[in-house]
Structure formats: C-alpha cells, structure tokens
Image (cartoon, helix red, strand yellow):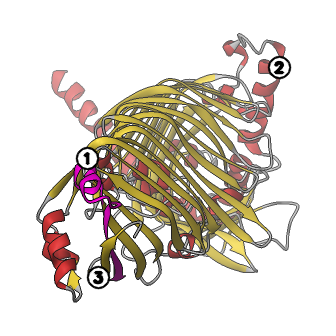
Amino acid sequence: MPSSLIRRGIWAIGVAVLVSALVVAALPLIASTRIVRDRIAWEMSAWSGFRVTIDGSPRIEVWPSFRAILSDVTLSQWTETDAPPVVEAERVEVDLSAMAALRGDVVFSTARLVRPTIRVYRTASGFFLPAIPSGGRITRSIDTARGVVSADPAKPDLTKLPADPFGTVELRDGRVVTTVGGKDTEILSSLTGQANWAAMNSNATLSATGIWRGESVAIDFASPKPLVLFAGGAAPVTLSFKAAPATFSFDGVASVSENAYFDGQARFAAPSLRRVLEWSQAGIAPGAAIGAVSVSSKVTAGAGRVKFENTTVALDNNPGMGALDFSFGEALPMISGTLAFDTLDLRAFLSAFTPLAPAGAVGPGEIDTSFADRINLDLRLSAAHATAGAIQLADVAATAQVKNGLAVFDISDASAFGGNIQSSLRFDRKPEGTQVELRLLASDVDGGAFATAAGMTRLVPVGTGTVSVILKGPGKAWDSIFENADGSVTATFGPGALSGLNLPAFLKHTEQGGFFALDDVSDGTLPIDGAEIKATISKGVARLDKAEANSAKYKIWLSGIASYTGRGLALSGGVTQLDQAATQANGQGPNQSSFFVGGTWRTPFISPISRGVSGE
C-alpha cells in the first residue's frame, strides 16, 4: 500500500511538472496569438489616455520575467492627428502578468521607455509641460479626485479617492524637446528616471537625472497624496534639485490649482551667484562673481507673490538675516525686502542687480543697464562691516532700487575714514542715453586716509575735513562718465599737515630757476592750519577755482585746470610768506614765489615764474 501511494504521488508530481512546462512553453505561442499588438496598444491607450501606435511586432520573453518588448512606439493626442507625437520611444519594455496572459488579458505593472523623446510646450505661466491627455484611467482618476477635493477642500475624504493601479514607469536615455521656429530644440538630454505610484490613492515618488544646459541635474520628488495634489488640493510635498551650479530643496505643503500656493521650508545654495545667473539664463547680466551663496527661509507663495520669512543668507560665508518679498503681478517682477549682515561686499552684492563694474574687471567696459528691463528692485541693506572696493565701512545703512529705467544705490549712513560717509549712485535711462549721477559727502574724515583710498598721494591734506563730490554725465561706458562729467568738488580741512612737500627744498629750487620734478621735493611734510579746495568739473576737466593751504608762515595756492582724459596739468600757483615780523621790519608786503605746474598727474613738473615781494 505505501508503495502504491508513493507511485501515485510521483505520477501526480510528474503531471504537475509536465503541465507547468507546457504552460511555460505555451506562453510565447499564447502571447503571439492572443496578446497581439493591437491589444497591447489598446491597453496602453486606456492607461495613458493617449493614442498609442506600435509599428514593430511585439517580442515576448518568458525568462527571467514575462514581458513584451515593443519597438517604435508613439503616444499622440486623439484629437490632434496632425500634431507631432507627445512621446516617441525606440523601445518599450512592458512587464506582463503570465496568468492574465493565459486568460487573454493584458495586465502590466512596469513600463520602461528606452530612448524616448518627450515633447513639451511653454505654458502661459512660462513652464514647459507636455500635452494633457483627454481621457484614460489617469485623467478619470484625477477628475474623480477633483470632485472629492471640491466637496471639502480643507479636509477631503481620502477614502473616496479611486484606487486604480498605476505601477512603475522608467525612462532610459531620453530627451525633452520643444518646437521653436518649426524645429525641435532640445531642452533636456540623457534623461533617466523612475516614477513609482502603486495605486492612485497611494504615495508616489519620482527620481530622475539628466543634462540641462550642459550641466548634470538630479531631481527627487515625493508626496503621500499625489492624487490630491494633481486634483488641485493641498498635499505634503518634498522636492530636491541638485546640480553643480546650484542646489535647491523644499519641504512643506503645496497646491497646484488655479490658485496655487506653497508653504514650507526652502533651501538654496550655490558656489557662485554669477555662475547661477549665467546658467539659468535669467536675463540679468551678472557683474562681479559673488562666492558661495546659501539661503534658508520659510517660504509662503500664492497669487503671484512669494514671501521669504526668517531668511538666513550667507554670502562668501558672511551670514545675514532678513525678509524678502517677490511680486509678479506687475509687468516686471518686483523684489523687495530687508537684509542685515555682519560683513558684506557691497560692490559684489549689488553688481548682480545693478550695472556696477565687475570686481577685478580689465578695462572700463560698457555699462549694462538692460537689467532695468527685466526686474524691479527695492532692497534695504545694513551691515556692521562692509567693503566697497578698497574702502572699509562700518555701521552701513543702504538701499538699492531699480524701477522704470532708474537704478539707484544709496548709502544713507556709514562710518569710514574716522568720519561719516553718505553717497548716491544713480543710473537714469533716457531716450538720449543713460545718464549717471554720482554724489558723495564725507564729513569729519581723515583726509590722508580718504585721499589714499581715492588714489591720490601728492599734496594731500592730512587732517580732519569734509569732502563733497557731485558728478553727472552720459553712461555709455565707465570712462565716459568721468571724461564727459559735469559737476563740482569741494573740500575743507582743519589743522593738520600737507604731505608730500618739502617746502624749504621747493623754495630753494624756485630760487635757483629752471624746471624741476615735484618728486625732487616730495620728501617732507608741511604743518598747516587748514586747507580749502573748490573745483568745477566740465566735460571731464577740473578747473580749480580755489585751492589754498595755510600754515603759520606760508600760504600755498593753486589755480588752473586738470584733465581727466589725458591726465594733463596746466596750473599756476604761488607760495606767500606770512612772516609778519620780517615784513613789518622791512616795511614791505609778504614775499611770494610764483610757479607753473605742468606735466601729468603721475609726473608733475614745476617751472618757477618769479620771486618777488607782494605789494611792491
């Protein structure tokens, strides 16, 4: 008896193995006869909502998994027969259910699109998106979810969401194109990624990599309620974007309805703001290359407005805090807000938004004011310490404004050179050309330190004084501002010294006659009681209306012109001796030496005119 049972068991196992083998062997035959090309195309159409065509014959593989390999697959809009396909793929690999195939059904959970081309179009909002299908299970599920969300937008009933299966979609070596001038223009290449969405009412994730504008990028997206999000409701979202020029992440709640909004924490970082502006093709001409930039902020966006609250900003590892507001309701986007820094490079920061000359640039260059056509700006800045080129500033309060062709940068208050600095730089675009206006008021500053920062080292009053500069001229190029500027320069200084002048040696040279270089008598310093300078600027030429320095025994004066363009000098001057005891004893007026100053700013020469007694 036992042996009989054993024999029957062996026969049963053998029959089962034989049946299984026959089923496996029959799958390709069944697939080739029942799961035909049109049946697969129909199922893919019902799933996606697009008209699916398969030019090549399906190839069925049983091992290691049961799948169909399709060639030359296109997905197109049903209503636009003449339009190019939304998706074209050289090959599509579909994982099939073997049991469903035996029943004559097509059930697949994974689709791999190999070397697909995805066609997108620019929407009214400026984004590039593919065409939306007019039907299909996905569209119907979103329509159903939209009704659920509309019934209770604040807290939709998730149990009423459709539970249709979706599966996994993979992309391998794809590209994204758009039509420009009747020709396809590639936006994204080497696109590889995977979207996992088991069922419509479950969570979804997306990971993709590609090459955008010459840089490798990676995107990751996840949401526990994607169907609610696509139906116009609010759902939690995490998003990250990584590339060499910049990284960005968002974690919060989002809605993509007609009244879309975002509310969450956002982070942005870039090794160079200039590189980001160039790579993003934002249309803002980058100036100086700000180093590492990072921003972390609470973001609230909606109705054409983005608010950044509790914002932490770091520029070149210099941290700052504040708030920003982006508005998009006007013709141009508007950026406004306040930022406070511990340390800040004003020149580098503002060159990203204003036509300041690039730091370290070679030559004067053209002034680019095209930024005024693309953005409105209203920023309030403060910094405990700041630099403007070689100038060191402290306790800075400044504003940067760009609107209607006018760009203004004002330092309303700052400490520098032992005193106080106020300045204004304006770029005003007019039909006849850009006009640039520069104003500077330096009060109670150290004249020597101020002059050194301005690049002047000869005959500089060293002492406390006040300097006022007003210049205005055409702004085609940086050189043209000074070459054609009109304005004025005034300065007054109290007790101190006149550096770079050995007066006894100067007077000795004038007595001997013949011209001599100012360098020959620059190894001294003359104590003075005060100095005053007044100059009128016209077309880049400074006319000295008054330039006097007074000491206990002498008065030194200059008058004439100095050219900015050629750096030439044409000045007359004099040294008047104010030794009252000597003049009263002789019954004469004060002695005076007159001279002419020529040459250039760098190499001035002195030519004595006469030496006499005033009042004779």
Residues marked 3 and 1 touching at CB (< 8 Å): no
Q: Of marks 1 and 2, which one's residue comes earlier in the chain?
A: 2
Q: Residue at x 76, y 52 (%)?
A: 404
Horizontally, is 388 left or right of 147 in the view?
left
Numbered circles on residues, count: 3
Residue type, label 1: Ala
Based on the displayed image, in which of its 4 quarters is residue 77 positioned? bottom right
Per the rendered image, the range of residues in magenta is 577-599
Percent x, y for residue 257? 76, 32
Q: Is residue 369 left or right of residue 604?
A: right
On screen, residue 91 versus residue 594, left or right, reads right
- Which sits in the foreground, 493 or 235? 493
Q: Gap in Å between the C-alphas at discs 3 and 1?
A: 23 Å
Name the residue beneath numbered marker 2.
Answer: 150
Query: Which of the image's four quarters has the C terminus?
Result: bottom left
153 and 246: which is toward the camera: 246
Image quadrant holding the N terminus, namely: top left
Q: Circle 2 sits in a helix, a strand or a loop, which is it?
A: helix
Q: Residue at (42%, 66%) from the top-left corner?
A: 615
> In the rendering, at what x and y percent does residue 511 appear?
19, 79
Can residue 218 be seen by looking at this rendering?
no
Given residues 359 and 480, the one toward you in this image is: 480
Residue type pointed to by label 2: Ser
Badge 1 local density, few (<14 within 10 Å), some, or many (20+)?
few
Mark toward the start of the polypeptide (3 vs 1): 1
In whole angstroms, how far apart are the C-alphas of marks 1 and 2? 90 Å
Q: Nearer the viewer, residue 78 or 478?
A: 478
Question: How far separated are the C-alphas under marks 2 and 3?
Answer: 94 Å
Choose mark 2 or mark 3, whichever is in front. 3
Tag in front: 1 or 2: 1
Q: Which residue is mark 1?
A: 552
